[in-house]
Image (tube, helix red, strand yellow):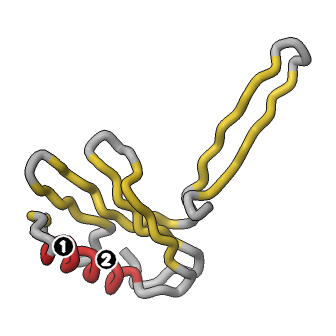
Amino acid sequence: MPIRLDCPATLRVSDDAGRLVRSEELRSGANLADRLRDAHEAYERQGWTVSALRPGAWGFTAERGDRRLLVAVRMGLLVTAAGTFDRRHGSLSLYLGSEAG
């Protein structure tokens, strides 16, 4: 993983089913390695068993009891899309949004 990116990134925490637990937008130019290391240390302090944080890694896993999380840096903003199709009019409505709101 590069130390910094010239675009926004997201620190994303998801459970073992892939559901979003939390996310944090990281500004362009943020030190990604430091932020990931801070998250690693925070989960460890909270009693989670964390996988080794290897140089260049984009993420790590955290386990506590029967819960398992993936904590990872993702490039760009995470965007969600939803749509509805109106059969009567043959039209498609698309809704876009980011996890930040």
The residue at 31%/40% (across/down) is 17
Front tag of 1 and 2: 2
Percent of width and height locating residue 85: 77, 23
Quarter of the view holding residue 81 = top right
Percent of width and height locating residue 8: 56, 74
The answer to whether marks 1 and 2 mark residues whose Cβ atoms lie closer than 8 Å is: yes
Q: Quadrant of the N terminus?
A: bottom left
SS of the residue at dot 2? Answer: helix
Q: Is residue 55 left or right of residue 100?
A: left
Q: Is residue 72 left or right of residue 52?
A: right
Earlier-in-chain disc, 1 versus 2: 2
Residue located beneath label 2 in the image: 36
The residue at 44%/64% (across/down) is 23
* Amino acid identity at mark 1: Leu
What is the total number of numbered labels drawn onto the structure image?
A: 2
Mark drawn on residue 53: 1
